[in-house]
Image (cartoon, rainbow, N blue to C red):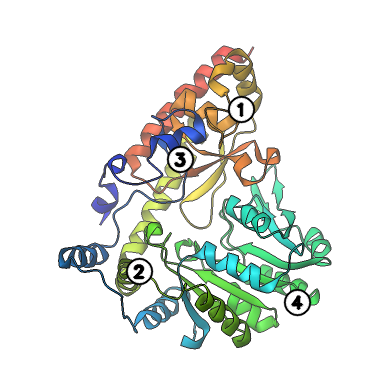
C-alpha cells in the first residue's frame, strides 16, 4: 500500500483550501509555496471508501440517508483500535467537531464564564470562546528548552480551575503532538472535579496515535469528572471536508440536553456522502491506517535526521500522534529579523495577514508554506512553525532541500 501514499494527486485543480494560492499567500506571502500548513493530508482515502464514493456518485441520486448501522460501525472501531467498550446510548452523531464543541460551550456555560484553553492552541478554540462571549483563560504548557518538549503545568491549572467553568482540552494535543498518559489524565480529571470544572475533550487526532492512547471519557468516568469527548473520522481517514463527527457522553442528562439542542437547530442529520464515507472507513480502514502511521513516522524520521544533519538551527519536536508538529526555530529568529530589516518588502503583513515572521521567511525564501507559531497563541510562540508532514515523501524532500538552501543563504548573509 506504500504506492498509494506515494501517489501524487494534483490538488490545485480541486477545491482544496490547502492548495489554494490565495490561502497559501495569506500564510506566507507567496502563492507558489508548497503547502505544509492546514491539517489535511495529501493521501487518497481507504480504497473501499473511494469505491463507495464512486458507486454513490454514479447512482446520481443523493437523497436523505438512512443508516442505522452507523453507531455500530463506530463502536466496533473504538473497541478494536482503542479497546474502548462503549454503548450506543453514549453516542451522538454530529456534523463536525467544532460545531459540537460550540454547542456544548453554549449549553454548559453562560456569557463571561471562564473557559480554560491550553496554549499553544488550535486557533478556532480561541475564536469560539470569544464569539460566544465567554472569558478566555489561557493555560500555557510548560516548554523544556533542552528536551524541546511541552508538558502540563499543574500549578497553573489548579489556579485557573478556581474561577473557570469549562476546560476545552485537546487530546492528542494540537499543535504539540502530545499524547497524555492515564496518570496525567487522572490528575487532570481530579483537579477539574475538585473545582467542578467540566472538560470537553477534542480527540479528533486520537486514531492517529503512535503509542497507546487513553480517552478522557474513560478516565472521566472512573474519577467522576464531568467529561464529554468529540471524535471524528476526518483527520484519521483524510475526509475533513465531509463534516462528520461523534460526540460521547457518560452523563445521560447532558447527552439529552445536547440532543435537544441539535434538534432545535436542525443539526441532527449528516449528508449522504459523509455518512457513506465515514461508515465505510470505520468498517474497512484498519489496515490502511496501520500502513499510514508507518509512512508518517518514516516521514517524521526523515525530517528529524535531515534537520539534524543539515540545519541544526531548526529542531523538530517529535509528536506522539498525528501528522502535524512544531519546528522550533529559535536559533534562526535573530537572522530572520536581520533579513526583515534588509528586505522589509518580503515581510509585509498585508501580503500575509495570517502569517508571522517565520512563515514569511520560509514562504519567501524557501517557497514553503507553514502555519506561523503566532497563529497558535500570539508572539509568545513566534519561534515556532507548524509543519504538516502528511504528504508524499517527494514533497518533503523538495521542501527540505529548499529550507537547507534558504537557511544557508541566511547564515552566509547575516552571520558575522
In the rendered image, residue 154, in percent from the top left (x then y), is placed at 77, 61
Please give the residue where the numbered disc 2 appears in the rendered image.
271
From the image, state whether disc 3 or disc 2 is nearer to you.
2
- Identify which residue, 383 or 88, lies in the foreground: 88
Q: Which badge, 3 or 4, comes first in the chain's sequence?
A: 4
From the image, state whether disc 1 or disc 4 is nearer to you.
4
Q: Secondary structure at mark 4?
A: helix
For marks 3 and 2, give the CA distance.
38 Å
Please give the residue where the numbered disc 4 appears in the rendered image.
193
From the image, state whether disc 2 or disc 4 is nearer to you.
2
For marks 1 and 4, give the CA distance.
43 Å
Locate the N terminus by quadrant: bottom left
For marks 3 and 4, give the CA distance.
41 Å
Tell me, yes or no, whether the two marked residues, 3 and 4, touch with CB atoms within 8 Å: no
Q: Secondary structure at mark 2?
A: loop
For marks 1 and 3, give the CA distance.
17 Å
Classify residue 34 as left or right of residue 370.
Answer: left
Q: Which badge, 1 or 3, comes first in the chain's sequence?
A: 3
Q: Identify the disc placed on residue 332.
A: 1
For marks 2 and 4, give the CA distance.
37 Å
Query: Are there few (<14), some (14-19), or many (20+) residues within 10 Å of tag 3?
Result: many
Q: Is residue 39 visible?
A: yes
For marks 2 and 1, give the CA distance.
46 Å
Please give the residue where the numbered disc 3 appears in the rendered image.
303
From the image, state whether disc 1 or disc 3 is nearer to you.
1
Classify residue 77 as left or right of residue 337.
Answer: left
Q: Name the residue rendered at 66%, 58% in the picture.
A: 129
Tell me, yes or no, whether the two marked residues, 2 and 1, touch with CB atoms within 8 Å: no
Amino acid at each position: 500500500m506504500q504506492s498509494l501514499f506515494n501517489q501524487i494527486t494534483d490538488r490545485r485543480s480541486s477545491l482544496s483550501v490547502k492548495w489554494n494560492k490565495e490561502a497559501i499567500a495569506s500564510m506566507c506571502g507567496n502563492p507558489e509555496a508548497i503547502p505544509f500548513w492546514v491539517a489535511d493530508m495529501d493521501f487518497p482515502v481507504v480504497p473501499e471508501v473511494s469505491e463507495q464514493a464512486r458507486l454513490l456518485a454514479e447512482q446520481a441520486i443523493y437523497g436523505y440517508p438512512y443508516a442505522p448501522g452507523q453507531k455500530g460501525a463506530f463502536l466496533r472501531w473504538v473497541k478494536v483500535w482503542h479497546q474502548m467498550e462503549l454503548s450506543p446510548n453514549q453516542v451522538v452523531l454530529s456534523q463536525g467537531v467544532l460545531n459540537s464543541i460550540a454547542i456544548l460551550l453554549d449549553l454548559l456555560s453562560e456569557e463571561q464564564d471562564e473557559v480554560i484553553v491550553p496554549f499553544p492552541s488550535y486557533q478556532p478554540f480561541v475564536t469560539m470562546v470569544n464569539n460566544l462571549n465567554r472569558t478566555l483563560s489561557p493555560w500555557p504548557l510548560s516548554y523544556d528548552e533542552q528536551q524541546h518538549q511541552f508538558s502540563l503545568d499543574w500549578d497553573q491549572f489548579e489556579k485557573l480551575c478556581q474561577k473557570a467553568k469549562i476546560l476545552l482540552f485537546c487530546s492528542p494535543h494540537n499543535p504539540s503532538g502530545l499524547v497524555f498518559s492515564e496518570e496525567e489524565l487522572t490528575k487532570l480529571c481530579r483537579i477539574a472535579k475538585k473545582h467542578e470544572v467540566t472538560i470537553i475533550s477534542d480527540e479528533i487526532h486520537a486514531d492517529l496515535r503512535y503509542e497507546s492512547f487513553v480517552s478522557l471519557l474513560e478516565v472521566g468516568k472512573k474519577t467522576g469528572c464531568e467529561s464529554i469527548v468529540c471524535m471524528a473520522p476526518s483527520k484519521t481517514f483524510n475526509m475533513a471536508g465531509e463534516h462528520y463527527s461523534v460526540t460521547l457522553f457518560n452523563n445521560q442528562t447532558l447527552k439529552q440536553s445536547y440532543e435537544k439542542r441539535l434538534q432545535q437547530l436542525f443539526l441532527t442529520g449528516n449528508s449522504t456522502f459523509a455518512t457513506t464515507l465515514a461508515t465505510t472507513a470505520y468498517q474497512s480502514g484498519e489496515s490502511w491506517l496501520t500502513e499510514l502511521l508507518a509512512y508518517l513516522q518514516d516521514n517524521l524520521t526523515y525530517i528529524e535526521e535531515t534537520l539534524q544533519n543539515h540545519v541544526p538551527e531548526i529542531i523538530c519536536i517529535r509528536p506522539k500522534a498525528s501528522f502535524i508538529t512544531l519546528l522550533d526555530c529559535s536559533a534562526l529568529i535573530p537572522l530572520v529579523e536581520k533579513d526583515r530589516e534588509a528586505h522589509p518588502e518580503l515581510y509585509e503583513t498585508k501580503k500575509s495577514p495570517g502569517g508571522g515572521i517565520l512563515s514569511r521567511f520560509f514562504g519567501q525564501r524557501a517557497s514553503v508554506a507553514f502555519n506561523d507559531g503566532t497563529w497558535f497563541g500570539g508572539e509568545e510562540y513566534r519561534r515556532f512553525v507548524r509543519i504538516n508532514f502528511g504528504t508524499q515523501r517527494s514533497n518533503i524532500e523538495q521542501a527540505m532541500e529548499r529550507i537547507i538552501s534558504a537557511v544557508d543563504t541566511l547564515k552566509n548573509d547575516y552571520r558575522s
